[in-house]
Structure formats: C-alpha cells, structure tokens
Amino acid sequence: MSKSIQMVDLHGQYQKMKPEIDQAIQKVIDSSAFINGQPVKEFAGELAEYLSVKQVIPCANGTEALQIAYMALGLEPGDEIIMPAFNYVASAEAAALMGLKPVFVDVHPDTYNIDVDQLEKVITSKTKAIVVVHLFGQSANMEPLLSLARKHEIRVIEDNAQALGAVYSFQDGTQHKAGVMGDIGTTSFFPTKTLGCYGDGGAIFTNNEELASVSRMIASHGQAKKYTFERIGLNSRLDTMQAAILRVKLKRLDEWNRARQEAAAVYDELLGNMEGTVRPSRSEFSTHVFHQYVVRVTEKSRDEVKDALKASGIPSMVYYPSPLHLQKAFAYLGYREGDFPVAEKLCNEVLALPIHTELRRDEQEQIVSKLKEIIR
C-alpha cells in the first residue's frame, strides 16, 4: 500500500536524520540536565550566528515570545499596538492579556502581509508598537515600515514564526534575514514550522543588548540572578531536549528551505494560469521559504474544494477561516464586517496545499490533477 499524501511529513523528515537526532536526545538523557542544559546555550549561539543577530533568547513557545517582547519594550495597559487582521491569534492574544489595545489593519492583496500604506491612518498618540507578521514564508515590506516607525517613534516587533531563513533586500542592496530588522523579533519552533522541534519552543532575537538582557530576565521569573527578582516575569524556557533537536535541524534549514522553494516551483508549473485559482506571489524585496503554499480559490466554494480534496485522500488547510477583527474574542474592539475587505476576502478563498521537505513531484502531480478536476 502506498503512503498517503501528508500535509507535513515530520516522520519522513525524522527518518532521514534519525541517528543524529537519537544521539542528541540520548546525550541529554545521559546528562540529565533537562532544564537549562548546555544545548540551550549552544543553540542560542548557533541561531544568532545563522540570523546575524547579536542576541537570541530561547523560550517556551512563540506566543510567550511575543508577550516577552511586549514586556521588554515596556508596553503598558492602554497602549495601542498595530497588527494585521489576517493573522493567527497569538500577537493579538498576547497584547490583550497585557491590557494593550490591538489595532488591526488590512493586508496586501498579493502577499497577504501587512499593508504598509494602511498604517499611518491608524497611528494615534497612544500607538506604541507595530507587530509585523512575516506570513507564509516571506518578509513583509520592512524598509518603508521601518521608516514610518522611526518618523512616529514607534517600536517594531517582528513575528517571524513562518519565515525563518527568508532574506529581505533593502534598496541600497543591504540584506537581512527576516525577524532581525525591527527592535525585537520572535519565532516559534512548533513542530510544523520550517524549523520545528518535537514539542513546543520559541525564541526572541534582538540587536539591542538592553532589550536582550530584559527579555532574558523576564523569561526567567524576572530574575537578575537566582532568587533576586527585579521585575515581574514569566517561567518560559526552551527545554534541553528540544534545544538539542533544534541544533541538529538548524544545520539543515537552508537545505530544507530550498526543497520547499523547489516544491513551490513545481506547483507553479503544474498549476500554470489555471482558471479559478490564484498562485502565491513573490515579493521582489524578499525571498520566500514557503512555510505554506497558499492558493486562492476564486470561482468555487473554497470549503467545497477542500472537502472534495479530502474525500480523494488529499489534505489541505485553511489559514485562516476568519479575520481577527471578526472573532468573538475581539468583539469588544468594535470592528465590523467590511472594515478590512482584503482580509475578509482572503479568509473565504485561501487554501494551503501540502508542502514539506519530503514532498515528491508525483504527489504534487496527483494533488494538482485532482484540484483541476474539482474546480473544472
């Protein structure tokens, strides 16, 4: 019996590096240093080198990474923090839990990233930060955004849970990895991310030594040193086992990103200019590492297409079925349907096709053939 098509093939990926992963796990067990073991420090240093950033602070997950970043920046209840309406809940959730006010903006219709042209009209005297989410694998347009933030003295937080390894190019030719251009960046190591562990994990990164020091303190109960608590903090640690696994996987991140890019090129070729669908666009200023390959279904019911694929044994996912401003949890903010038309349209059309490091061309041919059959 042939193996079924996987949305993400974590087991297949593991099999290709099994001896190295197993050895890394065994070394942690042998050391019994399950919390704050040496691999945590080693991974932080290696990720900092990979990103060309001064400081990396590992933590428990991507959501807490965002909360730690907000706390490190000194954001206080009532402060406004701008973020895209088409996005996962984490950035808004962490803000709301701290008493901050999420202020949503629409996204660009081609890249689905935050629409920089929409920012200035929502900036007020209470605006203290912008959260930039590098969605689906490519960087948002950082150069004009950073310029706007400097003009208004607003801090910039980069949520880079989906674009680790993507490279942004400034107009003068300078290049930086996504996540390290603002004041502070965050990521998630959820298993399905481009760099994922075998549990939960996250990290904060910054070139600002003071923000790094404060973030490190916050992540460790607010301790400057053991039993000396200088501020209210969290207990947010990346455990040693996950760090050891991530060290093995980080060595392969660029290779895996290339594999995703190659798979995306195959999808592009197979889909062509297929009626009723829109392929993912690539920004001229950013590489795309394709955490997701997201098409838009424009002439049929997206949900019917998804169900028909499922009935044929082909998985797909919807990221995201509802924009944040229309979620019940954020009804208190007073937004209404029609406020962010691009985000609302995308939520009715987007469909992520399987993409991962083990995806084969024959599987992609099967996926696209069935998609064409359903849509036609």
Image (cartoon, rainbow, N blue to C red):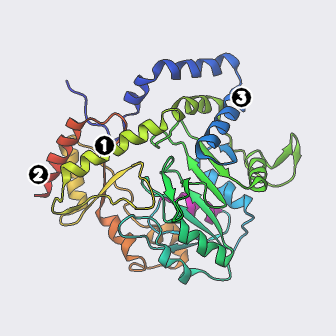
Residues in magenta?
Answer: 88-97
| Residue 63, percent from left and from top | 59, 52
Q: Earlier in the sequence, mark 3 or mark 2?
A: 3
Compared with 253, 187 (above or below) is below
Q: Earlier in the sequence, mark 1 or mark 2?
A: 1
The residue under label 2 is 373
| Residue 262, percent from left and from top | 32, 42
Q: In this orientation, does residue 332 appear?
A: yes
Q: Quick one: SS at disc 3?
A: loop
Front residue of this view, candidates 238 and 263: 263
The amino acid sitting under disc 2 is Glu
Q: In this orientation, does residue 127 appear?
A: no
Mark 1 nearby-residue class (10 Å; few <14, some 14–19, many ≥20): many
The amino acid sitting under disc 1 is Ala
| Residue 358, percent from left and from top | 34, 33
How far is disc 1 from disc 2 in space, using C-alphas?
Answer: 21 Å
The residue under label 1 is 263
